[in-house]
Amino acid sequence: MAKIQAPVKMKDVLHVTFTDLTHEGKAVAKVDGYPLFVEGALPDETGEIEVTKLNKGYGFAKLVRLDKTVPERQEPPCRVYDECGGCQLQHMTYEGQLNMKYNQVRNVMNRIAKMPDVPVHPVLGMEDSWRYRNKAQVPVGLSGGSIVAGFYKKRSHEIIDMNECLIQHEQSDEIIQKVKDVCAANGVMPYDEKRHKGVIRHVMARIGYQTGEKMAVLITRTADLPNKEAIIKGIRDAVPGITSIVQNVNPDKTNVIFGNQTRTLYGEDVIYDTIGDVKFAISARSFYQVNPVQTEVLYGKALEYAELTGNEVVIDAYCGIGTISLFLAKKAKEVYGVEIVPQAIEDAKKNAELNGIKNAAFEAGKAEEVIPAWHKQGIRPDVIVVDPPRKGCDEALLQTILDMKPKRVVYVSCNPGTLARDLRTLEDGGYKTREVQPVDMFPQTVHVEAVAVLTLY
Ligand SMILES: C[S@@+](CC[C@H](N)C(=O)[O-])C[C@H]1O[C@@H](n2cnc3c(N)ncnc32)[C@H](O)[C@@H]1O
């Protein structure tokens, strides 16, 4: 193995000044130009670190102590913050987090998109940056003879028992605790992943933010749920107003959470929620945005950028269950949504029906294959909205957008790096990026969403 050339050695203890924060929330300290990544520190702080890993060109270190801190530092409110890994920025004030996210978007617009002059607006943050998630999904296990449910410890499968998670809806915490208690009282053994024995593997709680509806999903290894009737009654008694109790069976030895078999044990198969004035039916397996407050902010921006007057043909690429499509349909002439997951397209069609929306059509398939086919069929969009996964848009789709020449392109992105890359391609093809609006969908974590609008030159 080639020897790694680095100006530091393993276990060296060094005094450093932190200069930067990566998109993963790690502080950067440079020693003779060699970057060391350190969890828990912030830019402009100084302190001692111990080197833990050396790679070619960069390494890692752990924080030993800080001797100078910055005003952006705060005490993380969560008691398991250091162990859990679900959040990465609780040691930073919310204002600091929003600045960090702004810088992240600004930097990629300069560095990757090569657009130093494009306006990037301050991040639209939340008034209350806690308790925003509408879906919690936690593993269940056995520890010291008791049932535990919570999150995996960083880089391990050891479960941290948690009574509360400060970014989850309070009622999700309640559902998880009560399901755990009811399972314990009824002798339902937690899943043991090493021996592939036991029954209950995960619990998922879902809340309709606007409707208040509540769903509990018990993910089990076996289809047989011991003391099923007592469990249903126990959960109904312990969680007043619960509208849906569902069992999903996953018999496989796998890290994938859900199995293929789902049955409703009590109440409805779905819960309902609304975004704007569009109502959505959400089943145990449906994809649905997890931050309902900011989803409205994000989609509101997309709608504003689309500048619809009622006469436009709109394509919504990567449409999921049709959330953006249906949100836009009321202001457009026609909307066409495409999404790779057939079940999501089924949900999109049902949701269109549920809302009496007749001018939205959906097709399952790859955006980069279906949209060129639409082009050949003569569909001429005025606006194309894209909301791709983290890897960004497929090149063939970007080329099709350039061929179709819609007046406006609205790009919703969960990864600023690939957003910047794709904006550059569209600019090179004749579009101009007018502005970029970052939106904080995931406070306390490093993730940032952004929406950009482009028009034909
Ligand atoms: C970031 S999500 C957006 C979902 C939706 N717009 C929303 O706001 O709920 C990206 C979606 O793209 C879908 N997807 C991934 N690759 C795709 C492809 N090649 N063609 C179409 N859809 C794809 C995923 O299944 C996922 O639903």
Image: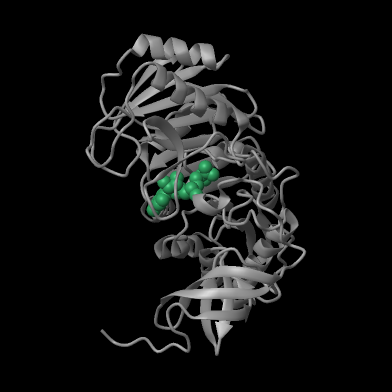
Residue 208 is situated, as x and y percent measured from the top left of the image, at 58, 27
Rendered image quadrant of residue 438: bottom right
Pick the quarter of the image with the C terminus. bottom right
Q: How are the residues colored?
A: one colour
- Look at 43% across and 53% down and name the residue there: 375
Q: Position of residue 172 (x, y in %)?
A: 55, 30
Instruction: Pick whichever, 376 or 150, lies toward us.
Output: 150
Quick check: 404 above or below 113?
Answer: above
Q: How many marks?
A: 0
Left or right? Give the position of 174 relative to 222.
right
The answer to whether residue 116 shows anywhere in this view is yes
Which quarter of the rendered picture does the N terminus lie within?
A: bottom left
Q: Position of residue 322 (x, y in %)?
A: 51, 38
- The residue under the point 37% across, 16% down is 186
Q: Residue at x 62, y 42 (%)?
A: 295
Closer to us: 156 or 382:
156
Residue at (52, 11) in percent of width and height? 237
- Is 447 or 4 nearer to us in this picture? 4
Q: Position of residue 284 (x, y in %)?
A: 43, 29
- Indicate the quadrant where residue 100 lies: bottom right
Q: Is residue 120 left or right of residue 366?
A: right
114 lies left or right of 205: right
Q: Is residue 377 visible?
A: no
Above or below, 223 relative to 92: above
Q: Is residue 343 left or right of residue 69?
A: left
